Amino acid sequence: MSLSSYVIQDREKIDLNDIRLSAQNREQLDQLLKENLYTEKLQKYNLPVNNKLMLHGPSGCGKTSTAKAIAQKLGKNLYILDLSTIVSSRIGETAINLKSVFQKVARERAVLFIDEFDHIGKARGGDEREVGEMRRMVNTLIQLIDYFPENSLLIAATNHLDIVDQALVRRFQIVLTYEQPSKAELDSFYEELLLQFPEQFRTIDRVYDISYAETKDHVFTAVKRSIIADIELQGM
C-alpha cells in the first residue's frame, strides 16, 4: 500500500481569524504559533517548543479547520492521517505505515494532523490478533511522538478523549476543548452569516444545540430555499 493511500496533503487555505474559538483556546493557540514561528531563537536558550496539540470536542466545531489554519499561518505543508485507514491486517505492517508517515512529515518540517484519534480506543475488540496489532500501534505511536522533531507540528483530533489511551494523551503538551456553541454564540453567528444576503432573505427559522458547521449549512439551505421561491414567484 502506497503512502498516498492513507495520508493526504491538504491545500485548503483557512485563516485562523475566521474560526470561532473561545478566548482561552485562542490565547493558547497564539502562544503555540509564536513558539513555532521562533523555534530556532527559543532553542538558543535551551527552551523546549510546544509542538504537540490535542483537540477534542463534538463534530463540526472547528477542529479540522484549526489544523488547516495553523499550517497556513506557519507556512507549512499539512498532511492528514485517519488512523482507521492505516491499520493493516498484516501483523507488523501498521507500525511500518505509521513510521513512513512520520518520517515524511519530519523530512518536510510539516504539520501532521491525525484525525479520529479515538480509533485507538474504538478498535479494541475481543479478537486476540486485532488487540495485539492495536497494542503494537499504540506503542509505535508513543515512540514516534516522543521523538517527533520540534521543527514539525503534530495535531490530533478526537470526539471521545475518554477512550484514547492515556499514555498517548500525556504526550501532548496542549489539550484544547471545543464546546458546543451557546444560544447567544449561535445568534451572533446567525447574524454574521445572514448579513451577506439581501434583507428579504434574512428571516429564517433558527435552530440551536448544533455546531457552527451545522449552523452554516442550515443558513445556506434556508437562504437558497427563499431565493428559489422568490425566483419561481417572479416567473409566474
Image: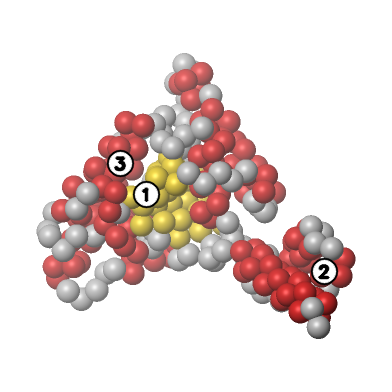
Q: Are marks 3 and 1 in contact (CB under 8 Å)?
A: no
Answer left or right for 213 relative to 49: right
Residue 159 place in picture, x, y as percent = 48, 64
Three-letter residue code for mark 1: Ile
Label 1: which residue?
A: 8
Task: Give residue 201's quadrant in the image.
Answer: bottom right
Give the residue at x 34% y 64%: 119
At horizontal 67% and vertical 44% (from top left) the residue drawn is 17
Identified at 33% across, 43% down, the residue is 145
Q: Amino acid at mark 3?
A: Phe
Q: Residue 120: percent from the left, percent from the top?
A: 32, 62
Specify which label sits upstream in the sequence, 3 or 1.
1
Q: Residues within 10 Å of mark 1 (few under 14, many from 20)?
A: some
For label 2, the residue is 202
Q: CA distance from mark 2 to mark 3?
A: 47 Å
Q: Which mark is residue 28?
A: none
Judged left or right of residue 35, residue 162 is: left
Residue contact between numbered discs 2 and 1, judged by CB atoms under 8 Å = no
